[in-house]
Image (cartoon, rainbow, N blue to C red):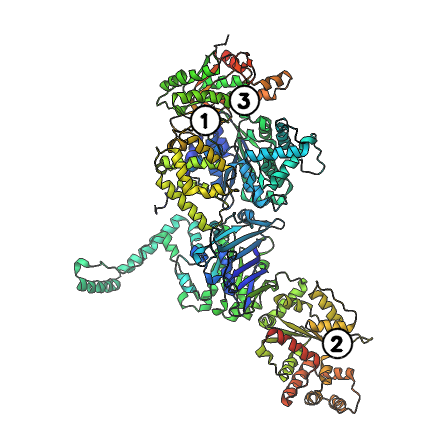
Amino acid sequence: MSKSAPTQASSGYQAAAESLRDNDRQWAAYESRGNCVVLAGPGSGKTKTLTIKLARMLAEDVSPPRGVACITYTRACAGELVRRLDDLGVGQSSRLFIGTVHSFCFQELVIPFGRLAGLEIPESVAVATENDRASHFSAALETVHGSDEKPFDWLGRFGRFRRTNLDRHQDGFVADDEGVAAIVLEYEKRLLKAGLTDFDQMVDFGLRLVEEHAWVRKAIKAKFPILIVDEYQDMVPALDRLVRTLCFKEGMRLFAVGDPDQSIYGFQDASPELMDELAKRDDVERVQLRLNYRCGQRIISAAETALGQRRDYRSNRAEAGTISIHKRPKGLDDQAAFIVDELVPSILSRLPNGDLSDVAVLYRDYNTGSAIAKEVQRRGWDFIRLDRGNPLPQSPFVDWLNQCAAWCAGGWKTGRPRLSSVISSWLGLRRFAAADVDRRELQVNLVRFLQGHREPEDSAFDWLNEFRDACLEGFLTEALESRGEKENFEKLLAAFQPKGAFAAFTVRTLGGQGGAKGHLNLMTLHNAKGLEFAAVIIPDLEQGRLPNYYALKELAAKNDRQYREERRLFYVGLTRSKIEVHLLWSGWYKNKSFTAQNGPSQFLSEVAKAIGYPIA
Amino acid sequence: MHICRVEIVNFRNFEHAVFECGQNVVLLGENKAGKSNLLLALRLVLDPALPDSGRKLRMEDIWDGIEEPGPEDGVKVSVDLTDFEEDENQLALLADHLVQPEPMVARLTYVWEPRKNLKETPRKESDYDFSLYGGDRPENRIYGDLRRRLPMELLNALRDCEADLARWTRSPLRPLLDQAIKEMDAADLIRYAEKIEEASEELTQAPEIVKQAKKLDDQLRSMVGKNQALDLLLRFAPIDPDRLVRSLRVFIDGGKRGIGDASLGSTNLLFFALKMLEYRQLVEEGDREHTFLAIEEPEAHLHPTLQRLVFRNYLRLREEEGENKLPEASVWVSTHSPHIASVAPLDSFVFLRSDGNATSIVSTAKLELSERSKEDLERYLDVSRGEMLFARGVILVEGDAEKFLVPVLAKAQSVDLDEAGISVCSVSGTNFGPYAKFLHALGVPYAILSDGDPDAEGVLGGLRRAESLLEKLFPETEWDLATWEATDEAAAENGIFVNGHTFEIALFECGLTVEFEEAMTSISSTGKRTERMEEWVSGNEEFDPEQFLKDIEEVSKGRFAQRLASFIVKRGSTACPDYIRKAIAYVQERANPS
């Protein structure tokens, strides 16, 4: 162990960059000198281009101690970027921030500058859990409007108000909805008093800090003269404004990547127009990637039909791919049984070295997910389920537990994940344990546990229990650090206990959460963003489900905003597939209170017609 | 960039010391006042060469005043930095550690404290641990990379410059030569190497050399036999082009003598020069952003003339660098040398003073003086070789006459000012303000002897001056000075002593008349002045103060004072004006409390 790790060739990215040369658009992005916006359709090598360009900028364009900040939307995307950069020989360092927009606002703006700038935040502040938020919201609602109001009637407006009224802290601001404004004020006051903050507030604070204080802009620009934004189409208005302030007012260099066609966070007030506008600026170089390395040409065409827009992406794949439409008239359960009993086995038989993990079932929401999961469990397959019905909670701590399990299950041999990154994530979670000796103890205990538990086939339940006794107790009892994680941990244990939903889970399966061999992928269309599979199955394509009922209602009222987003959602689903796409419908669906007989999804009909098999 | 404030808690001889400072610092204080401890405290925060084992303190490092340290008693050192925000590299390094936004101030803190999870009171070193953090947020930990980019380097008093210069890994010559290698054409370098190789080969083959080599070789063979032979040659080291340049060494006196033959002084001079070049280069190459150079008692090896030249240059870097460029290094020098102290900028002094229990630290960084006053004071320190800085107490006087006579008068009161460490400093006039402020800031006890100088109405100008001085020195105090008596009293309580008229008249009137007569007799060229003096002394004529002063001025006040001093000593006179007696006692009490 005393041998030093082999030094990564500093030219790792230079070798990798050679692979961009043949694609003139990717090369143009790689060669960009100033602000650059890369419009990257599905499968266009977006992440590859971004990571290689990032490595280059870090090596050639900024010198220590200054660095590069790279922000993206989800922890999963950030984790993927970290892995890809590691492959290029770019390790984690203080010169490189990679994380979500929220952690950027929190760690890089609110924590170091918030109190200095006079924001009224407590000395130690933690992120509110869903329960925290709900309870403070109810309390705020009751204080402002009395106890007769139902939270559900206000939540949507409440969230929208906070995300769209960016100037609400400025003098002279007049709220158009004073009832909501009062709740927001009360809610935010309560949250801070409890030593908590939430995602919307982090962004709000971040924006205020950079807009109101020249010294904050100066400091952040000194640290990060270059700002890289991944998935720009997901930016909510506040973040868009934050990026514009930093880049066009303060002069940070911007490298933004994204695809307006994949903007599917309208419910959080993201919109594709923000990125379109950004790309039109005179002081920004616009690079449109054209080549799609993922999808067969037939799949690309079908997807563009679904989108309702011609994009002229070209496939780089030899196979054209297949689109199959399956009618299962007996409803969703029938679709689920068909998927498990016939569709998946036949797909696997066609794929060379076919593995369950090559296949994904993508759907609208967790109701559909539950129907599929039931059949998958009946069949006895391992699966990963990413939706609200997932009994496995998701959080930074749970992500880290998965990493630990992955290390124990074989990562120690392959270096995926690296032990050092497992340790540093742990120390990050335990950031309030200040003394060095305590931190060393944390580290030693962790390594001792992991070393001693390298048994992939041990039960996940036992492993977690032993892990808790050896290392986690201190964390789980620290109210501030482990905000909400204690509950998450208990949910995990409940799921893995001998009679729980995942009693059969082993260390290996736990470690595989997020892309393991042998697991069928079940997830919502939203969660599938950024991922790719050999075959994609989309069930439940009924008119009123996709597009959904509300979008159709608004469309009838001449507002196609949500309807267009529904198209993009379907587009995202179709473009996850490399070779095979399977689309299922029944012509009817059941809701809580009624059964709707609206026929197949209109988007499905359009695709069917375009591929020459119109649905009668 | 520079350190603008330092706070030390519970470390060695410091209970709680806070001081402000500027670009460069001159640390003054008697032996054992804790100058080295202060530098060590800074190094705990800033020195990358200090190993972690050095950052682990011992129980005896906790301030002595704490007999049984409790769970809250830890050591803490905070260093505040400022003047970095216009340099983006420096700002990038410190942005996470700000404690003040405009102008930006960053704080780096070292603590050594009982471990949080300790069940009982701490008793031993392993109950403690250290950590470093920035911006007053303990969870915002700082690591070695920060220290490496803002290092404090210590040149201690007893270092061996010669060995450092000779040893490649530590030589400050190294970066210069490495830079030369980088800039050199590789082909040229190889060509030089080949030439030397050639010449070396020729020399090796010279029969005289071969002969001697064989002699040694034979001797070895006869000792160990041919199987164990060493196959010996006499030659230069094998020539590798890079190593060739690195093997260049410094010679002095036009190449005649190696550095080993140079005087300690020259070696040190060279060493300092190389260090400054090195720091500049390290910043230019992006290896670091700034260097804090701590030098302990450099006077040990430097001739006074060199001390003055070198440190005048070092400590006034800012002026030489011009306005646009910030200096790459700040210098913290601890010294007992008046030669160094006397050339330092006025606002660079940090003064350590021990009361036996704890050391207090004061500084002149925030001294509010006009540029002109500063220049005057600096010039005064320069020509007086920093006398005031090393005094235990100071008596400020108007001119040379007092300077000659006050020590004599004190002696007559059985106070030896030299022994007491009390200096008499002349401000050449009545502008005591800047001097008093300076001493006030340094915490040096002082008294002011001022002439009364009555105006036409009989109001004493000296008291007017005293009043304005009191207001300047103690801006927070509300003075109730309704009458001149009140002013006089308040002034005396604060060390300002005013006579009724003029120094000489006060002396004359206190009873030193015979001595005045003798002095005048021995000095005056005309009989008239002597005669008048005789008449006043004998009382035959009414004393005429104006004529009296005129006569003394005509023979020169200073010369007269010297002569008068001789006669006072000769006669063993003990008379002394009251205000002078009080002033001496005032300073003595404070400078040497019994």
Q: Residues within 10 Å of mark 3 (few under 14, many from 20)?
A: many
Q: CA distance from mark 1 to mark 2?
A: 96 Å
Badge 1 is on which residue? Answer: A385
- Lateral position of residue A196 relative to residue B225, left or right: right
Q: Give yes or no for contact between labels 3 and 2 (Cβ–Cβ under 8 Å).
A: no
Q: Nearer the viewer, residue B224 or B215?
A: B224
Residue B579 location (% of width, % of height):
70, 78
Front position among marks 1 and 2: 1
Q: Chain of mark 3?
A: A
Q: Residue at x 76, y 72 (%)?
A: B486
In the rendered image, the vertical position of residue B456 relative to residue A8, given as above or below = below
What's the residue type where badge 2 is placed?
Answer: Gly
Q: CA distance from mark 3 to mark 1?
A: 22 Å
User: Picture quarter containing residue B3?
Assistant: bottom right
Residue A391 location (% of width, % of height):
47, 29
What's the residue type where badge 1 is placed?
Answer: Arg
In the rendered image, the vertical position of residue B5 relative to residue B373, given as above or below = above
Q: Chain of mark 2?
A: B
Q: Is residue A274 visible?
A: yes
Residue A289 location (% of width, % of height):
50, 27
Q: Chain of mark 1?
A: A
Task: Kindly identify which numbered label has been placed on residue B452.
Answer: 2
Which type of secondary structure does the marked residue at label 3 adopt? helix
For the N terminus of chain A, the quadrant is: top left
